Amino acid sequence: MSNSKRRQRTYDHRLKELVRSTGIIDIALQRGVPRSTVRGWLTKNMSDVITVDVLDMSLVELQREVVALRRRNARLIALLRLIITVMKVTHFTLSQIRLPQEAQKLRVLQAIEYSRKHFPLKTFLRVIGLSHGRYREWKRVECGLDDLPSCPRLSPHQLTVAEMRTIQEMVTSEKYRHVATGTLARLAERMGEVFASPSTWYRLVRIHKWRTTAFGTQLDDGSYHLDRNPRRT
């Protein structure tokens, strides 16, 4: 059984608007539009139509737009390559950087939310070196984003690689060999280098054997550095 339903034809809204604004129906008639349809355009109210602005641009305007977009795209690619190269050379990663202030974390979170429109969250976090756990902790705003002792933590604080390296360097340094480990912990906090309790420093010294013995300072690789006045830990 054949379908005898008449197919409804559609016409460009710009053609309708041209006929309505000029009153010349021959413009549409020459393009095969029935006369009754054209006269209906003149008597009926036109409905609002939302279109893309590029459809109203001329060929020259479109070509200029393409050239401008290509130039902008090339600049962005060059800037992105420079940033990625610097990050690789300097081994930059947020896993080794502490952001104690709320404003700093908010700026990173805002950049992440904007980038999620164009990249998956997993990809962006891997590029900047931010773990999912740290990202989720920043998203908790019950106590704000500042690193304050009054804000309860759901999990123990984990030191970054850079902080661990700083602790090792200060414990085994000749400059601080006369300073007790607990004093070093407070000194590092005042210097803004490491924010960890003295008990954490004692634990790391014991585990990694960054201690001063009768033979000298024992380094992480097991070798000793000779000291005249061994420092007690």
Image (tube, grey):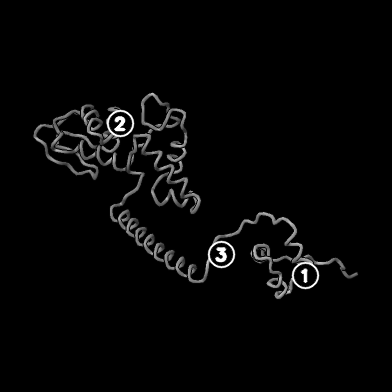
Q: In this view of the protein, which residue sits in the foreground, 78 or 19?
A: 19
Would you say 146 lies left or right of 120 here? Answer: left
Is tag 1's residue or tag 3's residue first in the polypeptide sequence? Answer: 1
Q: Which residue is mark 3?
A: 56
Q: Which residue is mark 2?
A: 196
Q: Which image quarter holds the C terminus? A: top left
Q: Residues within 10 Å of mark 1 (few under 14, many from 20)?
A: few
Placement of 203 over or under 73, stated as above or below: above
Q: CA distance from mark 1 to mark 2?
A: 85 Å
Dot 3 lies on which element? helix
Q: CA distance from mark 1 to mark 3?
A: 26 Å
Residue 118: x %, y % from top left: 49, 54
**Residue at the extreme right of the image, as rendered:** 1
Would you say 202 lies left or right of 43 here? Answer: left
Asked whether the residues under the numbered discs 2 and 3 touch, taking CB atoms below 8 Å apart as contact, a structural biologist would say: no
Asked whether the residues under the numbered discs 1 and 3 touch, taking CB atoms below 8 Å apart as contact, a structural biologist would say: no
Query: Which-is-in-front pick, marks 2 and 3?
Result: 3
Residue 16: x %, y % from top left: 68, 64
Q: In this view of the protein, which residue sits in the foreground, 83 or 193?
A: 83
Q: CA distance from mark 2 to mark 3?
A: 63 Å
Identify which amino acid the numbered label 1 is placed on.
Arg
Q: Residue at x 29, y 39 (%)?
A: 163
Query: Which-is-in-front pick, marks 1 and 3?
Result: 1
Is tag 1's residue or tag 2's residue first in the polypeptide sequence? Answer: 1
